[in-house]
Image: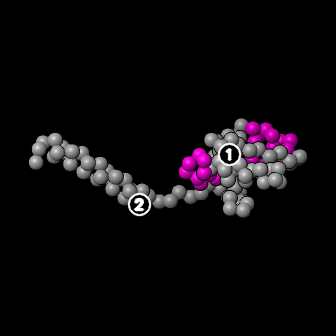
Amino acid sequence: MTYSLLLLLIVVGSGVVVWLVSIIVEALRPIPKTPTTLSWAREIPIRYIKVRDYQLRYISAGTGPTLVLLHTLRTQLDLFEKVVPELSKHFTVYALDFQRRATTLTSLLTPLRAFWMRLIFAV
């Protein structure tokens, strides 16, 4: 057995060991609890609603005329951290957070676009 082949086996074997250890560590790690409030607004509970095949996380705060906040594809509910407390002084604010489950952009955009079109515009 040559020195370079032995070195290659050691490197590959080390990588496999690291991979296996990481799988074991993840399997032993406790599952985190789903938060019930936002870190930036403990008084506002996080709620969930199922609309067709989609699960939406949302918050509602304040009283007054209804105002719905929608974030962009690459952000989440926490984008509204600064505006919800202020807007909720004058509006009933609903901030929706679409829970993304797709692994590719194409598989995400098609159902997401159709979902928002049906939800918002009743198309």
Residue drawn at the location 17% of the way across and 45% of the way down: 5
* 24 magenta-colored: no
Label ID, residue 28: 2
Q: What is the x, y in percent for residue 116? A: 74, 50
Q: Look at 71% across and 37% down and name the residue there.
A: 82
Q: What is the spatial separation of the Cα atoms under label 1 and label 2, in whole angstroms?
A: 30 Å
Return the disc, 1 or 2, that comes first in the chain's sequence: 2
SS type, badge 2: helix
First to last magenta residue range: 83-107
Quarter of the figure with residue 69: top right
Q: Identity of the amino acid at label 1?
A: Leu
Residue 27 spot, x, y in % from top left: 42, 60
Query: Which residue lies at the image location 12% right of the left edge and 42% below the top edge?
Result: 3
- Residue position marked by numbered label 1 in the rendering: 77
- Point 76% across, 41% down: residue: 85
The answer to whether residue 55 shows anywhere in this view is yes
Q: In what element is the residue under mark 1? A: helix
Tell me if residue 86 is in the magenta stretch: yes
Q: Position of residue 121 (x, y in %)?
A: 82, 50
| Number of the front mark, 1 or 2 | 1
